[in-house]
Amino acid sequence: MLKGARVVSCVIVLISTALAFSGISTAVDELAPDFSIEDIDGNVFTLSEHKGKVVLIDFTNTECTWCVELMRELVVIRENYTEQELVMISISVADRDTVQDIRDYRQTYEGTWAFAKDNQDLQSVYDISATPTEYFVDVNGCVQSKITGYRTWDVLAAEIEDAKTGCGAPLLPVVVEEEPAYGFTIADVEGDEFRLSWYEGRVVLIDFFIPSGLNSVLMHEELKAIRGNYTDRDLVMISIAVEAENDQEVKDFKEEHGGAWTYARDVEGLWQQYGVSATPTTCIVDVDGNVQFHNVGLIESQEMVDDIENAKEGVNPQVDCLTDSSCGISPIVPIIIAVVIIAVVLATVAYRSVMKRKEE
């Protein structure tokens, strides 16, 4: 029975491989769907945590002949790239593969990177119709290319090199703190308009999230803690979904995980303007409309409190020039000098008057 299953599996892969050799499927300008998965060693692998590195996702099957052949090529790739350049993970999408099967597979073919079993239906999320399938995620977090079927290591290396320069992905602007935040107007999921410029004089927290992202769900727990500590007059909040098919998907997320603030769906490409290379991404805009804080990834609520408090003051907060030397000479100094001069003049006049009387 095992041999029969293996034959069927390999026949499917051979057919798909023949089709795949006609060309490489590439998705341009698309953020790779974020995910967190526990590997066979008990460590959590989160795609969005590897911003700035190329990520190779290998969707595999321990009983597939072409997967075994590709493993040998992947070993060569791993030997030729540092961990700072390239992150790798192999994910088995075969239902019959157990964790022990995957451990044995890794040991047999000397894999030194992360291995996991697909328990989150990533096979559907990443549209895996056959194994092996390789996804190359570039340094901006976008899909560089997708290859189905066996390839030699040099072909894989060429894709990695392209992904290192962000080929096929938009170059995200650098969001500079203490510089003006990108102004925008967006319709929320209730059909109401939200315009950033309306809230000048108040702190605004902008949360970019993906409804299907585990880290986005976890981030919302932190955001709810923030919301509970500030009034609407102190802090305006908006969560913007960067990957949602429709407003209803965002509404469903808000109902299940969200809080008491505004939710919208990004249909204007705001994620590019705010440097969203992964989700969640948080941006805090101060009372003057400048970026106070910009963070990619999960962050605890307590870590944002100081930035919110600083944002209340703005980039150039008002100071008491009588006690603070940072604003230069106090306006009261010239008055004091004038009073001293007048006092000296009056004293001089009085002295001369007394001396004149004595002479008389």
Image (cartoon, rainbow, N blue to C red):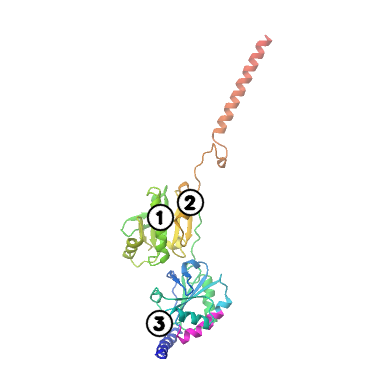
Q: Do tag 2 and tag 1 residues touch (Cβ < 8 Å)?
A: no
User: Image height check: is 359 above or below 229?
Assistant: above
Quickly name the residue at label 2: 306
**Residue lying farthest top?**
360
Residue 154 x/y as whole percent: 55, 81
Measure the alpha-carbon separation of dots 2 and 3: 50 Å
User: What's the magenta bit mostly, secondary-structure-wise?
Assistant: helix
Horizontal side of residue 275 vs 190, given as left or right: right
* Residue kind at label 1, given as amino acid type: Ala
* Residue kind at label 3, given as amino acid type: Arg
Q: Which stretch appears magenta?
A: 62-76
Magenta span has 64?
A: yes
Residue 338 x/y as whole percent: 58, 28
Measure the alpha-carbon separation of dots 2 and 1: 14 Å
Q: Do tag 3 and tag 1 residues touch (Cβ < 8 Å)?
A: no
Quickly name the residue at label 1: 225
Residue drawn at x 40%, y 88% is: 5
Residue 24 x/y as whole percent: 46, 80
Residue 121 x/y as whole percent: 39, 75
Measure the alpha-carbon separation of dots 3 and 1: 42 Å
Magenta span has 133?
A: no
User: Image height check: is 331 above or below 209?
Assistant: above
Query: Which label belongs to residue 96?
Result: 3
Q: Look at the numbered disc 2 and give the secondary structure of its residue.
A: helix
Q: Look at the numbered disc 1 and give the secondary structure of its residue.
A: helix
Horizontal side of residue 289 vs 339, given as left or right: left
Q: Do tag 2 and tag 3 residues touch (Cβ < 8 Å)?
A: no
Is residue 276 visible to us here?
Answer: yes
- Mark 2 or mark 1, which is nearer to you? 1
Foreground of the two, 83 or 102: 102
